[in-house]
Structures are given as C-alpha cells and as structure tokens.
Amino acid sequence: MSTSQAEAAEYVRARTLAAKLDCGESTIWRMVQHGLLPQPAVRIGQRTTLWHWPSVKAALGAQAEGGRP
C-alpha cells in the first residue's frame, strides 16, 4: 500500500464511522454536537464529510480515561 493510500484510509465517512462505533449515523452527528467526537476533518461537496480516524480514536480514548477531548 502506498503512502497516499495509507493516508486516505485514515479518513472515514459517517456511515463507516457509525459501523465502526456500532451506532447509527444520527448518533454520530449527535456525538459531534455534544463534543464527544471531533468535528469532521474534511468536507467534500455539500453532503460528504470525512473524519480523521486517529483523531476519533484519540477522542474516544480520552473519554475512556475519564476526560473529555
């Protein structure tokens, strides 16, 4: 896998993020609204947003340790 492919794999859409976190897409947006997940990192067009997966994991890890991101 090339470097650009590896970097691209670090960004996920709402549907993929919801699947990874075992919840619905509306829950993802609610978690963002409440500050539990970071804002999307990239917006492509009007309807496509991407999250930086390592940032999401870090935010969830901080919550697991008792702190907020």
Image (spheres, rainbow, N blue to C red):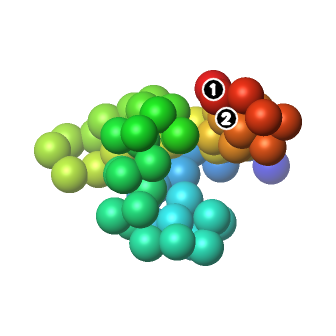
Assess disc 1: are there few (<14), some (14-19) or many (≥20) residues with their C-alpha within 10 Å of its C-alpha: some
In this rendering, would 12 be left or right of 59?
Answer: left
Choose top left, top right, bottom left or bottom right for residue 26.
Answer: bottom left
Whole-angstrom CA distance, mark 1 to mark 2, is 5 Å
Residue 57 visible, this angle:
yes
The residue lying at 79 percent from left, 43 percent from top is 64
Instruction: Provide the residue designation for mark 1.
Output: 69
Residue visible at 53% across and 40% down in the picture? 37
The correct choice, above or below, for 51 with respect to 68 in the image is: below
**Quarter where residue 52 is shown:** top right
Location of residue 59 with respect to 10 vertically, above or below: above
Q: Quadrant of residue 19?
A: bottom right
In the displayed orientation, state which residue is furthest to the front.
Answer: 66
What is the three-letter code of the residue carrying label 2? Answer: Ala
Q: Can residue 54 be seen at all in this image of the molecule?
A: no
Q: Mark 2 points at which residue?
A: 59
Residue 44: x %, y % from top left:
28, 40
What secondary structure is marked by label 2? helix
Q: Badge 2, how many Cα within 10 Å: few under 14, some, many 20+?
A: some
